[in-house]
């Protein structure tokens, strides 16, 4: 079947009331975040993204019933045992 522009899906008709406003706000927020990211050093942006991905993964796993916390994830990645954390104090 060939593409026919007359029969394209009108996504606007599928949206619930208010969804367009939410999508616009999200788009605006992403633009601001992109602007801030352009003004920061790349390693800072990469670190922020890394931490955000780890936090999101932790929240997702908790929804699935896993009991790992964000701190547990960071300790595992840094290979830090619980006994090592408080030795310096």
Image (cartoon, rainbow, N blue to C red):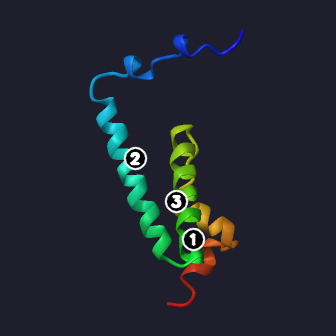
Comparing 68 with 23, the one in front is 23
Tell me if mark 3 has few (under 14), some (14-19) or many (20+) residues whose alpha carbon lies within 10 angstroms of its own. few
Residue 60 versus residue 33 in the image, above or below: above
Residue 69 image point, x, y percent: 53, 56
Residue 83 versus residue 4 in the image, above or below: below
| Residue plotted at (62% across, 69% down) | 75
Residue 35 image point, x, y percent: 43, 65
| Residue plotted at (41% across, 56% down) | 31
Q: Provide the secondary structure element on which disc 1 rests.
A: helix
Pointer 1: what residue?
47
| Residue plotted at (52% across, 67% down) | 48
Q: CA distance from mark 1 to mark 2?
A: 23 Å
Q: CA distance from mark 1 to mark 3?
A: 9 Å
Pointer 2: what residue?
27
Tell me if mark 2 has few (under 14), some (14-19) or many (20+) residues whose alpha carbon lies within 10 angstroms of its own. few
Residue 2 versus residue 71 in the image, above or below: above
The quadrant holding residue 13 is top left
Tell me which numbered mark, 1 or 2, is placed earlier along the sequence: 2
Q: Nearer the viewer, mark 2 or mark 3?
A: 2
| Residue plotted at (59% across, 69% down) | 46
Q: Provide the secondary structure element on which disc 3 rests.
A: helix
Pointer 3: what residue?
52
Q: Is residue 3 left or right of residue 30?
A: right
Q: Are marks 1 and 2 in contact (CB under 8 Å)?
A: no
Q: Provide the secondary structure element on which disc 2 rests.
A: helix
Tell me if mark 1 has few (under 14), some (14-19) or many (20+) residues whose alpha carbon lies within 10 angstroms of its own. few
Q: CA distance from mark 2 to mark 3?
A: 19 Å
The quadrant of the image that shows the N terminus is top right
Q: Is residue 11 left or right of residue 25?
A: right
Residue 63 image point, x, y percent: 51, 39
């Amino acid at each position: 079947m060939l593409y026919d522009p007359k029969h394209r899906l009108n996504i606007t008709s599928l949206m619930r009331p208010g969804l367009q406003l939410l999508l616009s706000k999200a788009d605006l927020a992403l633009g601001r975040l992109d602007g801030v990211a352009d003004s920061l050093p790349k390693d800072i942006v990469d670190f922020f993204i890394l931490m955000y991905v780890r936090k999101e993964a932790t929240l997702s796993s908790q929804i699935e019933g896993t009991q790992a916390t964000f701190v547990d994830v960071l300790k595992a990645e840094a290979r830090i045992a619980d006994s090592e954390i408080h030795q310096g104090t």
